[in-house]
Image (spheres, helix red, strand yellow):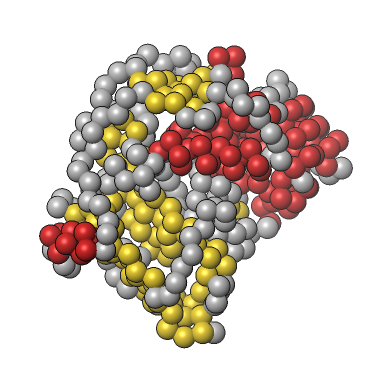
Amino acid sequence: MPDLAGFLRTAIALGYTVLPACEPQPESAGLHVDYIFEAGSETLCAGTEAHIERYLERVIDFFGAETSGDFQVQVHIGGESACSDSGACYLSAEMTAYVPRLDIDAHRTSGTLRHELTHAVIDRIWGTSTPFFNEGLAEAMSRTQARSAMDIGMPLPVGGMLGENATMIDYTAAAYFTRFLIDTRGLRRFERLFRESRGRAQAEIQTLMAEIYDQTFEALEGEYLAGGPRCLYQLDLCDAEGAVAVDLPYAIVAPVSCNDPDYFGSLSGTDLRIATNRTFALDVGGSYRLRAMFDASEGSLDSEVWLIRCGDCSRQAAWELLGFGSQLDLDAGLYTFAVSTSVEAVLALNLERVESL
């Protein structure tokens, strides 16, 4: 692998600015979110606010809703938590989210922020529901928990979770079932289920579902379980409006830095968590050669570069690119390069067409 100095010289020659390590930033306020740091030296990376604001816009668009200009949520980071379990939560009465840390182990970069702020948007538009649908809907959009690169998995029975509190719910299973209901029966009927489930026990929720969907819960769950792999939405990952133009062959050599506005995440002491997503449209299907090289002064076992296929559950796919070349047959469509790491580095990324299908 080329040495870091060589990569840096190349990056500078191509016009990229190589920035130093993150400097602590003051408290900040975005269009919809105020960040309040209660304790410690944790700070947002340069692209975090923009990433979160764009994500929230896409969540609002998903509901076909408009929020007034005074929609503002506070996020308290660190310090004493008002959450009942001392973890992360959103409190509707206060319009305030509490997170112990910006990035939590086993969660995607900025995933905790996305999840709790998704609750805030849903609460503003629809109010709250039973914990199963509160968490299922928020997780379907925010993709918080790190299970796989593309969040596709086999469904599990969910009937026993419907009346449980949040600590007893498998968030991903609830998210899969929530998306199934929305995709197959529509958003409007799910809105009624969401609103009217609040405060109901499991048997009452199943009766309500039979009333709304004209099918027993057992029939709905049977269809869900028999339908093959399920997936989550990709609102944080695939952004058609923000897709970049790709002229082939496509090649970049660029710094990976908390100070780079393309990267979101956080810095806490020496603990760095950063990521970026580059969405692009592939106009012509064919055989493509891809390679990613990630050079850092210190190695990082959790550095990842993925090519993600955007779309519904039948289209979603993911290929790991870091450290070796891949030749893939790709259909025309929307894709995202997803990068995540815990070190500052330089990334070299290449995409070229070998032949057309």
Which residue: 77% across, 27% down? Answer: 196
x%, y% of residue 217? Answer: 77, 41
Q: Is residue 20 left or right of residue 237?
A: left
Quadrant of the image for the N terminus?
bottom left
Answer above or below: position of 324 versus 204.
below
Which residue: 59% across, 14% down? Answer: 93
Which residue: 16% across, 62% down? Answer: 9
Answer above or below: position of 130 versus 143.
above
- Number of marks drawn: 0
Which residue: 78% across, 47% down? Answer: 185
Residue 100 quadrant: top left
Q: Is residue 345 left or right of residue 48?
A: left
Q: Is residue 11 left or right of residue 95?
A: left
x%, y% of residue 88? Answer: 45, 25
The front one of 258 and 231 is: 258
x%, y% of residue 194? Answer: 72, 32
